[in-house]
């Protein structure tokens, strides 16, 4: 499932990307552009705007909570999603991450990271390099919390 998120849902868009979902986010897009993009690319429009959520001819999920954990839980539950490709997309630009070897990224990572890590991923879009450091561990813990059943409909 692919998404486009409105300007109020930038953090949700980032976390859906981290969970592995293709999620477009551009705070400059107006309502008309969001709807047109969702239709043209068969994306679910994520919004907190009740008027926008009433648009016809587009799949929309009205996000009802302000808090990130509840937003992610709502999206997973309402759309019956199981995130199984976490850390496969760039949280910044949404492009897929590709495995690369140390020699490819050695000049782009801190020396300590080059000495202590063997696994790296490179964003094909923005060229950011990712590795499983302490920040990744905290993110992985958050992903695990998102995956836990939180509602009556989850098992």
Image: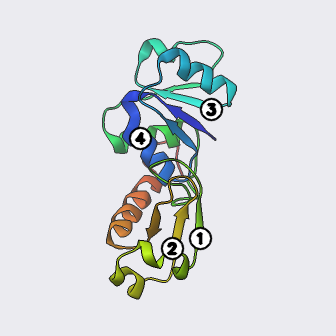
Which residue is outermost to the bottom?
Answer: 115
Q: Is residue 64 visible?
A: no
Q: Which residue is mark 1?
A: 99
Q: Earlier in the sequence, mark 4 or mark 2?
A: 4
**Element at badge 1?**
strand
66 and 78: which is toward the camera = 66
Q: Which residue is mark 3?
A: 43
Report if the CB atoms under discs 2 and 1 are less than 8 Å apart.
yes
Determine the CA span between mark 2 and mark 1.
6 Å
* 58 over 98 or under it: above or below: above
Q: Earlier in the sequence, mark 3 or mark 1?
A: 3
**As drawn, is 138 to the left or to the right of 2?**
left
Q: Earlier in the sequence, mark 1 or mark 4?
A: 4
102 and 14: which is toward the camera = 102
Residue 90: percent from the left, percent from the top? 50, 54
**Residue located 57% across and 79% down the image:** 101
Q: Nearer the viewer, mark 4 or mark 2?
A: 2
Q: Earlier in the sequence, mark 2 or mark 1?
A: 1
């Amino acid at each position: 499932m692919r998404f486009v998120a409105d300007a109020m849902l930038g953090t949700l868009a980032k976390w859906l990307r981290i969970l592995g979902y293709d999620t477009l986010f551009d705070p400059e897009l107006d309502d008309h552009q969001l709807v047109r993009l969702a239709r043209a690319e068969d994306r679910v429009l994520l919004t907190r705007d009740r008027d926008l959520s009433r648009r016809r001819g587009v799949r929309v999920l009205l996000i009802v909570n302000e808090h990130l954990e509840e937003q992610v839980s709502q999206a997973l539950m309402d759309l019956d999603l199981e995130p199984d490709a976490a850390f496969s997309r760039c949280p910044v630009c949404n492009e897929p991450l590709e495995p690369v070897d140390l020699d490819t990224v050695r000049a782009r990572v801190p020396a300590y990271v080059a000495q202590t890590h063997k696994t790296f991923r490179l964003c094909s879009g923005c060229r950011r390099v990712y590795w499983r450091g302490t920040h990744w561990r905290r993110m992985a813990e958050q992903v695990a919390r998102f995956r836990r059943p939180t509602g009556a409909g989850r098992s």
